Structures are given as structure tokens and as C-alpha cells.
Amino acid sequence: MKRKNKEINSNKKIRHMRASAGAKKQIRSLGGNILVGVILALVGSFLALPLVYAVITALKPIDELFIFPPRFFVRNPTLDNFVDLIDLCANGRVPFTKYLFNSIFISVCYTVLQVLFSSAAAYPLAKIDFPGRALYFKVIVTSLLFTTTVTQLPIYIILSEMELIDSYWAMILPPLGGTMSVFLMKQFMEQIPQAIIEAARIDGCNEFKVFFNIIIPNVKPAWLTLIIFAFQAIWNAQSGILIFREDLRPLPTMIGQIVTGNGIARAGAGSAATVFLMVPPIVLFIFTQSGVMETMASAAIKE
């Protein structure tokens, strides 16, 4: 009898807890979820305005581009701007496909090397105790204060001495020295329990196996995020004074050259070029953002 009474009481408690949880969930779904949804929709719409305006501007005819005050909507949409951009690219001495290949090759090589080198540099700072580790990390944090403009002259001198001017490496190597990516990877690696690494070492794994089999899979959110930022940064970069050969210039440099000539006459082509350059980073983000969100939610590792 006592056991039956205990079972009945426990069942009542369980039903009561489920009923209260259901009530709370119902209150959340009716009130909080609606409010959160509305706020997210408003914020998302506001953040999407620059992208939408760029597309609308690319569809405007030349007489609507310079109306003041500027109009958000286009009255007579046209694709003439994209046609003009294609014609300008087709009339160049170097084929358009060569510029596109240069940008893709530089972007892919830089992104892969950035993830690999940043992870390799962050691993000892996060998980290996060696003399001067704190000092090295302070230097990395301090270097975040400097802009790329400060290092342009030293970079040019170093690349010139290495005879890398007018080569793909002139655009790939200098950005690899950025320390923001190392800082990001280190912060994520510090979340991995040291006990997992020690267990792998006891099982006979050397540092390379620990790095590639333990560290890299568990910092997937970090290197997915790094891929997005690295690709976006290098895709929009121009060659500047590092590449003078026309057949080695990336796509943004070529588009910048053709749309800046003749001033107002090529303003429409410039708007179309802006939309064209936005497409690859957006596509990359669409394919990687789900992985970032999924691993952010499920890859929490605790001691």
C-alpha cells in the first residue's frame, strides 16, 4: 500500500510539473516568441536595407541615379547597367575570365592558408605552456591597434627584396600576418578541456595528431567564421602597388578601372559591378552560416 501511495504521489507530481511546464511554454509562445519574432524581423529588415538598396540602384536607369534626394525605389527598372558592364569587360585586353580566375585563386589560397596558419599559431598559445607565452599574446593583442596603412611600406620593401612583386603571393602573403584571426582561434581553443588533450597524449597521439584530430574539429565554429571573414576581405581587395601585370590583377581592380573612367557615363556600370562583387561572399555565407549556428549550439564542451 505504501509503495502504491508513493507511486500515486510521484505520478501526481510529474503531471503537475508537466502541466506547469506546458503553461509556461504556452505563455512564452503567445507572448515572448511573438515579440522576439517581431523584433528579429525588424532588425533583419533594417540590416538588409543596404543590400536591397544596392540591387535597386543597379536596376536604375542613368536618369534616376542622380536624382536628389535619392529615391529608394526605382520607377523604370532596367538591366542596361549589367549589359554595359559586360560590354566594358569584354572589350578589355585581358579576358574577363582571367580576372575572375585570379580572384578565385587568390581568395581560395588565402582563406585556406589563413585558417591553417592561424590555428597552428593559436594552438600553442592556448594549450601549451612555454616560456614567454603571455608576452607573445600581449604582442598579438597590441598589434590589433595598428591598421594596414602603417605596414604598407615595410610590406612593399620586404616583398621587393623577396622578388614577389607582380605575383599572386604579393596579395596572399601580407594579409596572413593579421593577428585578429589568431586571437579568435585562441579564444575558442581555450574552451577545450585540457583533460581531453592529455588523454589523447596518453593514448600515444603526438602534437600533430592532437591538433588535427582533437583541436580542429572542436573549433569548427571558429574556422567557419574565419572562412567567411577571410574570403570576404580578400575577395574585395585590390592589387594596389603590389601587382602591375594586367594578367595577374584580381577582378575588383579591373572593375574599378573600367567604372572610374568617363565619370557619370559609367556610374550605372559601377552600380552593377557592386552587386556582382557582393554575390560570392553572400553565397559563401549562406552555405556556412548554418554550420556556424549548429556548432555554436551543440559544440559546448565543459570539464
Image (cartoon, helix red, strand yellow):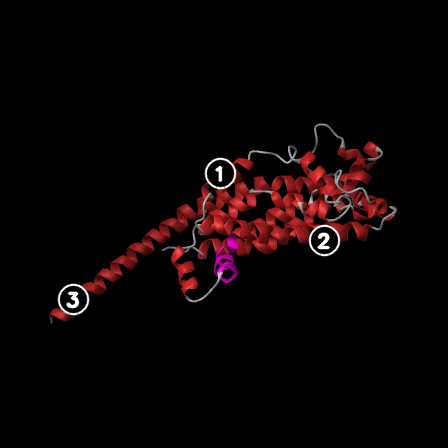
Task: Kindly identify the amino acid type of the residue bearing the numbered disc 3.
Answer: Lys
Residue that protrudes farthest toward the left in the picture: 1
Q: Secondary structure at mark 2?
A: helix
Residue at 76% from the left image edge and 53% from the top image edge: 101
What is the distance, in whole Å, between disc 1 and disc 3 at their CAs?
61 Å
Q: Callout 1: 10 Å neighbours few (<14), some, many (20+)?
A: few
Q: Earlier in the sequence, mark 1 or mark 3?
A: 3
Q: Callout 3: 10 Å neighbours few (<14), some, many (20+)?
A: few
Residue 150 lies in what quarter of the image? top right
Which of the image's four quarters has the C terminus?
bottom left
Residue 6: mark: 3
Of badges 3 and 2, the one in the foreground is 2
Q: Callout 2: 10 Å neighbours few (<14), some, many (20+)?
A: some
**Magenta-highlighted residues:** 207-221
Q: Secondary structure at mark 3?
A: helix
* Residue assigned mark 1: 138
Q: Secondary structure at mark 1?
A: helix
Task: Kindly identify the amino acid type of the residue bearing the numbered disc 1.
Answer: Lys
Task: Kindly identify the amino acid type of the residue bearing the numbered disc 2.
Answer: Phe
107 relative to 10 in the view: left or right: right
* Residue assigned mark 2: 105
* Residues at discs 1 and 3 in contact (Cβ within 8 Å): no
Residue at 22% from the left image edge and 62% from the top image edge: 12
